[in-house]
Image (spheres, helix red, strand yellow):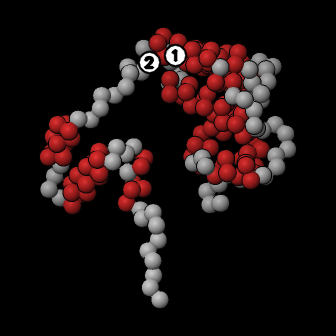
């Protein structure tokens, strides 16, 4: 598979020998290589923290994960500003969940106390999400579309916005909507 990380990359996630099974290939192939690289760096940090504190990284307990979250959240720079962003805390817990997923183990991140710990630190820092974004209304869409320049790029952007809105598409689905989904039939 093109872009699929190597078996050596997977071996860094798991402590024992790894068999390159169809399940593992599909799991790795369904995740972007950049995500795997970020998860690997996060997983390496978590394993190091676990080793320092003589705790098991795989399988990890929910208590271990919340301890790691508390450790990361308590790090500050020389000015007292948090050294680790809330989004990084979330990604680190995702990396822990991913490693458990690859090993066919239940994720300790699904235990409610882990989510509670993330939310606690978000509120302590004042970085808790404010809630869902307000939906795009037709009135606002019209204003955005009318503000686009009368160029080819403006026409393209108008088309993408209108198609995305009409189809209730996610941002990630819009580029794929221009790709044909079925091959053209050929005549003999």
Q: What residue sits 76% from the left and 38% below the top?
A: 103
- The picture places residue 104, in percent across and down from the top left corner, at 75, 37
Residue 148's place in the image compared with 80, above or below, is: below
- The picture places residue 16, in percent across and down from the top left corner, at 85, 39
* Disc number for residue 12: none
Q: What residue sits 60% from the left and 32% below the top?
A: 94
Residue 98's place in the image compared with 162, above or below, is: above
Q: Quadrant of the N terminus?
A: bottom right
How dense is the environment of label 1, judged by Cα within 10 Å: few (below 14), some, or many (20 and up)?
Answer: some
Q: What residue sits 55% from the left and 27% below the top?
A: 90
Per the image, the residue denoted by label 2 is: 128
Residue farthest along the bottom direction in this orientation = 188
Residue 119's place in the image compared with 21, above or below, is: above
First in residue order: circle 2 vs circle 1: 1
Cβ atoms at labels 2 and 1 below 8 Å apart: yes
In the picture, residue 93 is in which quadrant? top right
In the image, 173 versus 155, the foreground residue is 173
Per the image, the residue denoted by label 1 is: 119
- Could you say whether the residue bearing mark 1 is in a helix, strand or loop? helix
Q: Is residue 80 left or right of residue 59?
A: left
Q: CA distance from mark 2 to mark 1?
A: 7 Å
- The picture places residue 174, in percent across and down from the top left corner, at 38, 51
In the picture, residue 60 is in which quadrant? top right
How dense is the environment of label 2, judged by Cα within 10 Å: few (below 14), some, or many (20 and up)?
Answer: some
- The picture places residue 73, in percent across and down from the top left corner, at 56, 17
């Amino acid at each position: 598979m093109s872009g699929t990380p190597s078996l050596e990359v997977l071996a860094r996630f798991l402590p024992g020998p790894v068999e390159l099974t169809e399940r593992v290939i599909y799991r790795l192939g369904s995740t972007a290589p950049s995500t795997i690289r970020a998860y690997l760096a996060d997983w390496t940090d978590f394993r190091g923290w676990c080793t320092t504190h003589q705790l098991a990284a795989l399988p990890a307990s929910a208590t271990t994960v919340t301890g790691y979250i508390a450790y990361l959240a308590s790090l500050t720079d020389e000015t007292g500003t948090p050294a680790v962003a809330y989004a990084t805390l979330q990604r680190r817990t995702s990396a822990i969940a991913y490693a458990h997923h690859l090993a066919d183990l239940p994720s300790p991140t699904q235990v409610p106390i882990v989510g509670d710990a993330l939310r606690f630190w978000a509120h302590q820092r004042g970085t808790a999400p404010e809630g869902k974004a307000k939906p795009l209304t037709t009135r606002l869409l019209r204003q955005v579309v009318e503000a686009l320049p009368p160029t080819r790029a403006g026409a393209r952007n108008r088309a993408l916005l209108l198609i995305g809105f009409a189809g209730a598409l996610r941002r990630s689905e819009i580029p794929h909507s221009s790709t044909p989904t079925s091959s053209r039939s050929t005549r003999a």
